[in-house]
Image: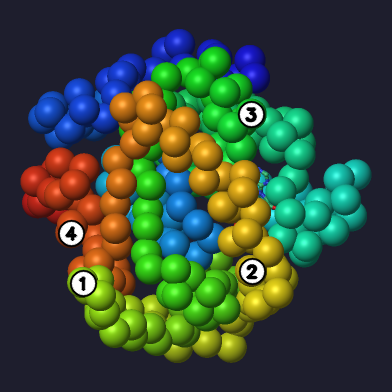
Amino acid sequence: MAAITRLVKRTPYLPCAARFLSHAPPQKERNVQWVFLGCPGVGKGTYASRLCNLLGVPHIATGDLVRSELASNGPLSSQLSEIVNQGKLVSDEIIMSLLSKRLADGEAKGESGFILDGFPRTIKQAEILEGVTDIDLVVNLKIQEEALLAKCLGRRICNQCGGNFNVASISLKGENGRPGMVMAPLLPPAHCMSKLVTRSDDTEEVVKERLRIYSEKSQPVEEFYRSRGKLLEFDLPGGIPESWPKLLQALNLYDYEEKQSVAA
Ligand code: AMP
């Protein structure tokens, strides 16, 4: 907790989405404090990590913190493994302690600003975060529900480079005024092909439970931020080629990306 407070005190930010969106794109020295919300499989990690690369802030995914604690075979490992493999949420206390440690380690390395992915996932977590820092903007990513299960089941990770891929090919027909959607697979390069692994919680039974838990515990977090004027709803129109430019536009970062690539 102290780590979050210290981090926040020296981090400049804009206080709400509306102000952010009406401002010029951020300069390099301005550190954002953003949150990405959305159901399992929606693509929070993909878009949050791309934005982090663009803005030069750390991508902090609490799911990654949990998996790395699990892999460390530390004192919490067996407890965490049981919870994660049932699709349940880890306790707020454990998550806060993993997150505080991550922020403290980052602070020691000179990090500032962040995009949080997968946190907060309960109202309690949102209240704790709200009590120690001002989040500038909360992006709520959404896709059609039918695509979520397929995206989770198609997810593959390279166990050498850590790259995230997806072998699912999704095509949903438009109906009842709803647009159709096509998402091409995101295939790995040849050298990752033999090293692909599937997350132990990406099985059909566990994904369904994670989706159920999301609507019970995490959906109220959307309202928490909506009522504070911080929520930016973003419907993904398709895969990365269609969605990334639109997301940049929605965040008023389209020109920013162009300037960055010219400067690179
Ligand atoms: P994710 O990679 O975000 O899907 O997270 C994987 C698993 O880690 C979740 O199903 C939870 O068991 C746990 N987890 C991650 N973030 C949180 C959080 N903020 N609160 C509680 N549990 C979490």
Residue at left offset 29%, top offset 52%: 234
Instruction: Answer whether labels 3 and 4 touch (C-beta < 8 Å).
Output: no
Q: Which residue is mark 1?
A: 177
Q: Earlier in the sequence, mark 4 or mark 1?
A: 1
Give the residue pinned by disc 4.
245
What residue type is disc 3 on?
Lys
Alpha-carbon span between mark 3 and mark 4: 34 Å
CA–CA distance in space, label 2 to label 3: 23 Å
Secondary structure beneath dot 3 equals helix
The type of residue carrying mark 2 is Lys
Of tags 2 and 1, which is closer to the observer?
Answer: 1
| Amino acid type assigned to the residue bearing label 1 in the image | Gly
Label pair 2/1, CB-CB below 8 angstroms? no
Residue 38 visible in this rendered orientation of the protein: yes
Q: Earlier in the sequence, mark 2 or mark 4?
A: 2
Q: What's the residue at 24%, 60% (across, down)?
A: 244
The image shows residue 243, relative to residue 51, as above or below, that is below
Mark carried by residue 208? 2
Q: How is the image coloured?
A: rainbow
Residue 160 vs 35, above or below: the answer is below
Alpha carbon distance from label 2 to label 4: 30 Å
